[in-house]
Image (cartoon, rainbow, N blue to C red):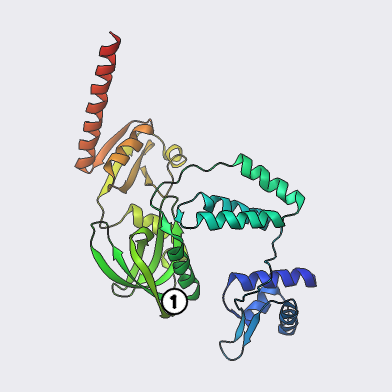
Amino acid sequence: MLSASSRLLRLLSLLQARRHWAGPELAERLAVHPRTLRRDIDRLRELGYPVAASSGVAGGYALRPGQTLPPLQLDDEEALAVAIALRTAAAGRVGGIEEPALQALVKLEQLMPARLRRRADALRSAVQALQGVGPSVDASLLADLAGACRDQLGLDFDYVDAKGGSSRRSVEPQGVVHTGSRWYLVAWDRVRSDWRTFRLDRIAGPAQVGGHFKPRPGPEGGDLRAYVTRSLLLSPQAEQARVVLHAPLAQMAARIPATAARLEAMAGDAQRCLLQCGAHALDALVYWLLVLEVEFEVLEPPALRERMAQAMQRAARSLARSEAKTV
């Protein structure tokens, strides 16, 4: 059983993680009696944390925002995790957040004990981030979307699709997914009555936050990363590339991330596998097929075979010119 002080820290962490907790659910998470929970809530209030309580069927507890909210309680590993996240954000692809992230990092490191500051300094000197790829997103938009997902609030926004067409979308947001190069919102489209993914950099202007909606089970059993991956690889609106790789499935799976392509075994052929992915960026696909350094056969689309032939012709001409200069 947790000690009283450890229980208070756990209670505070739970209140900070979610906007509202039902009393019985919160007591169950802490493995305490509801009376003990009420006493712990009173102790937090005495320490200055503005915990609000509501009664009735939907009653429970919520940590209200305030002008003088006491500092968050973090253990060593949590503090290091926050420091790493802030340093990554300071050099990341979220527009407008770089300077505030750096300022927050400086404040956090000033509050760290010496033993923890040494570990943070070691991470800072050893970990270097490469320049990010993909479009940046606005920090305020990202915060608005994340808040709407958390609080189950509807959203309306203008959206520009891949062909430049603009439309007004009304959705019930489920979550935000970062693929490493782009941010996507997963949401239930009220007009189309289906799940959709929206690239955040294609949301035009601010999103209008609406009223509460009743939550529904998410796609892919709630695995939003898997849903976004499948949506990107097998979009019915996008032309698909199919390529046979002359290498075992396990070998290629270790080199090609699931977010980049789908790999399948070839029936009766353990030495080859099938790669399938969207063919919207043919030049990039040509490049990645070449750097894999394995034999391959392009099944479709024909345009990929044409781009591959053009790349080979350019390479042959460049090689011929280089050889002519050495003669």
Quadrant containing the N terminus is bottom right
Residue occupying image coordinates x 59% and y 56%: 103
Along the line of sight, the residue nearer the viewer: 109 or 284:
109
Residue 183 position in % (x across, y down): 41, 57
> Label 1, on which residue?
153
Residue occupying image coordinates x 76% and y 68%: 6
In which image quadrant can residue 74 be found? bottom right
Q: Amino acid at mark 1?
A: Leu
Q: Is 326 left or right of 151, judged from the image as shown?
A: left
The answer, for residue 173, to whether it is visible in the render is yes
Outermost residue, right direction? 3
Along the line of sight, the residue nearer the viewer: 87 or 323:
87
Residue 78 position in % (x across, y down): 66, 58
Q: Is 320 left or right of 103, judged from the image as shown?
A: left
Along the line of sight, the residue nearer the viewer: 257 or 40:
40
Quadrant containing the C terminus is top left
Residue occupying image coordinates x 64% and y 44%: 123
Residue 177 position in % (x across, y down): 45, 59
Marks counted in the figure total 1
Residue occupying image coordinates x 46% and y 70%: 149
Along the line of sight, the residue nearer the viewer: 8 or 135:
135
The answer, for residue 2, to whether it is visible in the render is no
In which image quadrant can residue 14 be found? bottom right
**Helix, strand or loop under label 1:** strand
Q: Is 65 left or right of 319, judged from the image as shown?
A: right
Outermost residue, bottom direction? 56
Callout 1: 10 Å neighbours few (<14), some, many (20+)?
A: many
Q: Is 43 left or right of 89, judged from the image as shown?
A: right
